[in-house]
Amino acid sequence: MRHAGGRAAGADTVDSAGVVPAGPELLEAGREEIERAVAHAEPMVLRGLLYQLTGDPEVAATSIAIDPTGFQTAMMVARDDDVALLRRKAIEFLETYRATGAGPLGIGPEDRLPASLSLTLGEEIDDQEFTFCLEELALDPWVRDLEWRRVPPQDRLREFSVTIIGAGLGGLNVALMLKRAGIAYTVIEKNAGVGGTWNETRYPGARVDTPSRGYTHIFGAHFPYSSPFCDWAENQRYFDWVADTFELRDDIVFNTEVRALTWDERSSTWEVEIDGPEGRGRLRSNAVVTATGFLNRPMTPEIDGMETFRGASWHTARWPDGTDVAGKRIAVVGTGCTGYQLIPELARQAEQVVAFQRRPQWLFGVPGYLSPFPPEVAWLDRNFPYYTNFMRLRTLGTGKAFWRLTEIDPDFCDPHTVSPLNKTTREASLAFLERKLGDRPDLLATMTPGHPPWSARAVMVDADDCVLDAIRRDNVTLVTERIGRITETGIETVGGARHDVDVIVYATGFQASDYLFPMKVTGRDGRTLEEFWKIGGARAHRFCMIPGFPNLWSVYGPNTNGGLGPGAFHELVTRYALECMEHLILEDGRAIEPTEEAYWRFNEEVDERNARKVWSDPRALSYYWTEHGRSAVMCPFTGPEIWSLLRHPPLDELEIR
Ligand SMILES: Cc1cc2nc3c(=O)[nH]c(=O)nc-3n(C[C@H](O)[C@H](O)[C@H](O)COP(=O)(O)OP(=O)(O)OC[C@H]3O[C@@H](n4cnc5c(N)ncnc54)[C@H](O)[C@@H]3O)c2cc1C
């Protein structure tokens, strides 16, 4: 049974039967307009989509190659004449479709879909991957709903409630899925609005570096984003759209932080200690889902003399609204993704920028990274049936390309990289560095990382306007000597060089490995999560559950970074958690948790597989790896493997009381 409640306007751009409604725009378009739009179409998308809609063997016969630009080794249509053929066939298709009235159009034969999806992805997919990819294609926006196995007993359903912590990408999805399943919930959010990361991260230049077309929930797949890689404000627009369209705001308690969770064995409920505008309070619920993010608690370094600085200072996740940096001298401490996004923006406005870099990161130049979509792309989204769906699949992939790129090949011998593919990636990034800094050997050396690509977070930048251009400017100084102390007037390096500034910005990242920090979580028999994770750091069974902490799920839990985008990961964990809750409700269970044995078995596999990933390389020294000699954040599995691990809760690995 599919619970019908909560289905709201705005969600039905494509209905659940996968039929695109007719639009008048194409009917009025001339050949030239169609040609102009198709010139912007993505060839790999046309390859799969046209094949699905027409079955044309010439489309399927087009050849592909690895995209040499590096970032995540996607496939591309190899030959110009094949690209031209795909565009010509797309124009023919749209003209024929227009001639027949451009009415509702089905997705075409179901048995052709596996081949069509493979054509867009550029690799064969097996049956299991196909099911995963079909979900990602978002033909059915509600494909990840909980489907009740039978009608739940109403008295049991009425007495069951869930607390969700956080109203970002993850928490909003949990809320909507619970709403649609008919399960009562309350969201507790420490901020004044929804959006999580994007509500907090508002520094100049803050934007995603994974494609926006894939940065939605499945039910939001058709959200009309303005850019291929949206800035924080546009991401915030999406989250506000979700909260408003699906009427979630009334279920969220804003400006309220969860301080502690305590399991009450007697009643099999969680006591949730909150701190809000009315002071401290307590809630009780049968289950808790944490959606607190992992890049949420800023990490500010402790540097001698920090408190003596007379100017202003802040972390990038706490950028003060309306700050004018014109005419100011600004120090940026830290050069990860954030620092590299911020420096060029500041360089344009500030009098002087002094960037303190401990280690460079691998940079990949992407043409148009900072530009909005041309209108033709939005036209394709509106008028080419299923274009958006196939584009979503194309941008998300299955995670297997990234998995291959980051896998250590034990037979490969190279001092700088871990596999032939990893080497190709390094070469692409080196070529970009060379193009930008070839005439500045000093900067080229400074900006060339010593660790293999993707052993730490690589950074996507605009090919024509990025940090590599900024550091060439007269008003930007790149300092690689370690910081010694902070003085009343600025920053002094260990060698005694002084840099006087008006503002210090800490682009120093987050406490990524400290999951659920700083909440105090106390499970069965008074055991705290802090004690439980003391040895080896944060772990979870199948990414989301912990033995001794019943009825508790994390949607961005340990080892969920990489492998899959966070949106998909959140959705899969949410469905898994809801199926566990379904079990409790239908079978009259009170508490569900993984066995310790299953927890350790799963984590041994995680650690063993992470040891074969490039992020185990000791040269990288990033949040990808912890002092415990393992990763608490990185996921070593491919997308289809993650999907399979989370498709249904394995009852033989869970204890139900
Ligand atoms: C600068 C930056 C760039 C990024 N770029 C990308 C990108 O390109 N692609 C990508 O996929 N991801 C990116 N990310 C990662 C990003 O965090 C995730 O994409 C996504 O926002 C995670 O969603 P979430 O809901 O899990 O967590 P968050 O967005 O962090 O939301 C967590 C929410 O929980 C709330 N919360 C936390 N603790 C409590 C508590 N105790 N009580 C009450 N509320 C609490 C927070 O206030 C917040 O609203 C980026 C992150 C940053 C910081």
Image: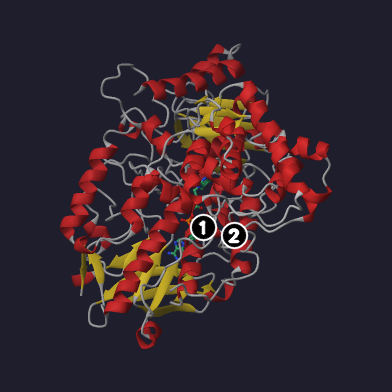
Residue for badge 1: 169
**Is there any visible trace of residue 163 in the rendered image?**
yes
Q: Are marks 1 and 2 in contact (CB under 8 Å)?
A: yes
The verdict on label 2 being within 8 Å of ligand 1 is: no
In the rendered view, tell whether residue 414 sits above or below residue 477.
above
Furthest residue in direction left, as rendered: 597
Which element carries disc 2, helix, strand or loop? helix
Q: Earlier in the sequence, mark 1 or mark 2?
A: 1
- Could you say whether the residue bearing mark 1 is in a helix, strand or loop? helix
Instruction: Pinpoint residue 558: horizontal percent, then vertical percent.
Output: 34, 51
Tell me the crowding category of disc 2: few under 14, some 14 to 19, or many 20 or more residues within 10 angstroms, Cα based: many
In the rendering, at what x and y percent does residue 93 appear?
69, 41
Quadrant of the rendered structure where residue 407 is? top left
Residue 183 located left or right of residue 415: right
Say few, some or many: other residues with alpha carbon within 10 Å of mark 1 (under 14 / 14 to 19 / 20 or more).
Answer: many
Labelled disc at residue 239:
2
In the image, what residue occupies the spot 25% across and 42% down?
Answer: 607
User: Is residue 228 or residue 147 the one in the foreground?
Assistant: 147
* Residue at x 38% of width, y 74% of height: 273
Ligand 1 closer than 8 Å to the CB at disc 1? yes
Residues 221 and 455: in front is 221
- Relative side of 18 to 523, left or right: right
Is residue 507 something one can see in this rendering? Answer: no
Q: Position of residue 20 (x, y in %)?
A: 65, 56
Quadrant in the picture for the N terminus: bottom left
Residue at the spot x=32%, y=29% of the render?
A: 617
Q: Position of residue 381 (x, y in %)?
A: 68, 48
What is the number of the mark on residue 474?
none
User: What's under tag 1, amino acid-wise?
Assistant: Leu
Badge 2 amino acid: Phe
Q: Residue furthest bottom?
A: 155
